[in-house]
Amino acid sequence: MIAPRGVRCMSFDPHKANLTRDAAQALTEAFDRIGTRQTCSRGTVLFQQGQPGDGVRVLRSGKVALFVSSADGRTRLPYRTVGPGYVLGLPALFSGKPFSLTAEALEEFEYSFVQRETALQLMRDRLDLCLQAASQLAGEVTTLREWQEASAQPRH
């Protein structure tokens, strides 16, 4: 898929995010320990924008593309690419709202799935992890704003 003119895709580097490396690792390891490991092939859609949030997914290997639907819902706009260590589904976990993005595998990958109630219980039991998740969400807001700003800039 080719991005519409003026739309830029970003990559996620957990080492450049607001979380320290140890904090990011503690969060992903905690979810990974209680999750169910699954493997998917290239092209698999993990979830679609608008579907109810059913839990979080911790990427263990491979890459996943994240897309946002256009206002009319007919075009998928590439938002970013994420890889190992990234936790998918935190906004839906905490808000109780549907997924705000579509996630699709760019290659074969492995992830750990943690059901919503189990993930929420972990956040209630481990406030340190809850704060780390909040930090990751804050980083996401910043990245989304940067993406929106870059997408609005005309390309030369």
Image (cartoon, helix red, strand yellow):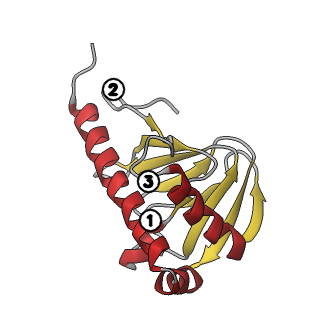
* Sequence order check, earlier mark of 1 and 2: 2
| Residue 11, numbered circle | none
Secondary structure at numbered mark 2: loop
Residue 48 lies, with reference to residue 107, above or below; the image says below
Taking 119 as reference, is 111 left or right?
right
151 or 121, which is in the foreground? 121
Taking 31 as reference, is 141 left or right?
left
Taking 133 as reference, is 156 left or right?
left
- Which residue type carries mark 1? Gln
75 or 47, which is in the foreground? 47
- Which residue type carries mark 2? Arg
Q: Quadrant of residue 27?
A: bottom right
Residues tagged 3 and 1 counted as in contact (Cβ below 8 A) = yes
138 or 44, which is in the foreground? 138
Secondary structure at numbered mark 3: loop
Secondary structure at numbered mark 1: helix
Residue 21 visible in the picture: yes
Q: Which residue is mark 3?
A: 19
| Mark 2: few/some/many CA within 10 Å (<14, 14-19, 20+) | few
* Sequence order check, earlier mark of 3 and 1: 3
Q: Which residue is mark 2?
A: 5
Q: Which residue is mark 1?
A: 132
The alpha-carbon separation of the residues under discs 2 and 3 comes to 32 Å
- Which residue type carries mark 3? Leu
- Which mark lies nearer to you, 2 or 3? 3
* Sequence order check, earlier mark of 2 and 3: 2
Residue 130 lies, with reference to residue 74, above or below; the image says below
